[in-house]
């Protein structure tokens, strides 16, 4: 193997890892639909924003409080739900960087959001909202 072949192999692996090359996800058995990784993450963000009545701009903002006065969950809690869903459905190979790109955060913030999920999970309101969104995502993807 010469240096050019090694370089091409490394670049191909990095592109695949850092979402420059799209991987497709087969959605449900018998469903002829494929989603790229970015489309999958975008779908989860859309469903979550619609559920909470916020825009993607608010989701991606640096704000930490509640998006609206009457909201049950704060923006970090909402982002934590998105990060958790992206990491667990349908495969666990979506990188933290790809998720961070969707929510306008770096990969370290996404890792922290996934870790905080367990802390937030102690709140019954959070759990109810999480499963509500998870069911909507499953329904939209026709996953069982």
Image: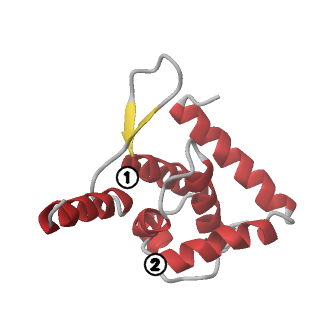
Q: Secondary structure at mark 1?
A: helix
Q: Which mark is residue 99?
A: none
x, y percent for residue 98: 42, 63
Q: From the viewer's perspective, is residue 22 above or below residue 64?
A: above
Tell me which residue sits at (42%, 73%) in the image: 104
Q: Secondary structure at mark 2?
A: loop
Q: Which mark is residue 38?
A: 1
Tell me which residue sits at (63%, 66%) in the image: 80
Q: From the viewer's perspective, is residue 55 above or below residue 128?
A: below
Q: Nearer the viewer, residue 93 or 13?
A: 13
Side (left or right) of 98 relative to 115:
left
Q: Quadrant of residue 86?
A: bottom right
Q: Tell me the quadrant of the picture where the C terminus can be found.
A: top right
Side (left or right) of 75 relative to 120:
left
| Disc 1 packing (10 Å; few <14; some 14–19; many ≥20) | some
Which residue in the protein does label 2 denote?
Answer: 106
Q: Tell me the quadrant of the picture where the N terminus can be found.
A: bottom left
Please indicate, yes or no, whether residue 134 appears anywhere in the rendered image: yes
Q: Residue furthest top?
A: 30
x, y percent for residue 63: 54, 82
Q: From the viewer's perspective, is residue 43 above or below residue 119?
A: above
- CB under 8 Å between discs 2 and 1: no
Q: From the viewer's perspective, is residue 40 above or below residue 87?
A: above
- Nearer the N terminus, badge 2 or badge 1? 1
Please indicate, yes or no, whether residue 68 appears anywhere in the rendered image: no
Marks 2/1: CA–CA distance: 16 Å
x, y percent for residue 89: 59, 45
Q: Nearer the viewer, residue 54 or 114?
A: 114
Q: Quadrant of residue 111?
A: bottom right
x, y percent for residue 129: 73, 54
Tell me which residue sits at (40%, 49%) in the image: 37
| Disc 2 packing (10 Å; few <14; some 14–19; many ≥20) | some
């Amino acid at each position: 193997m010469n240096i050019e072949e090694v370089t091409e192999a490394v670049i191909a692996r990095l592109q695949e890892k850092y979402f420059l090359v799209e991987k497709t996800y087969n959605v449900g058995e018998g469903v002829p639909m494929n989603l790229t990784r970015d489309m999958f993450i975008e779908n989860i963000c859309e469903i979550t924003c619609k559920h909470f009545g916020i825009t993607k701009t608010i989701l991606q903002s640096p704000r930490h409080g509640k998006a609206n006065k009457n909201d049950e969950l704060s923006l970090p809690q909402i982002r934590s739900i998105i990060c958790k869903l992206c990491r667990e459905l349908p495969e666990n190979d979506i990188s933290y960087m790809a998720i961070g790109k969707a929510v306008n955060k770096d990969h370290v913030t996404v890792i922290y959001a996934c870790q905080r999920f367990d802390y937030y999970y102690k709140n019954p309101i959070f759990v109810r909202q999480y499963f509500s969104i998870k069911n909507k995502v499953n329904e939209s993807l026709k996953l069982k």
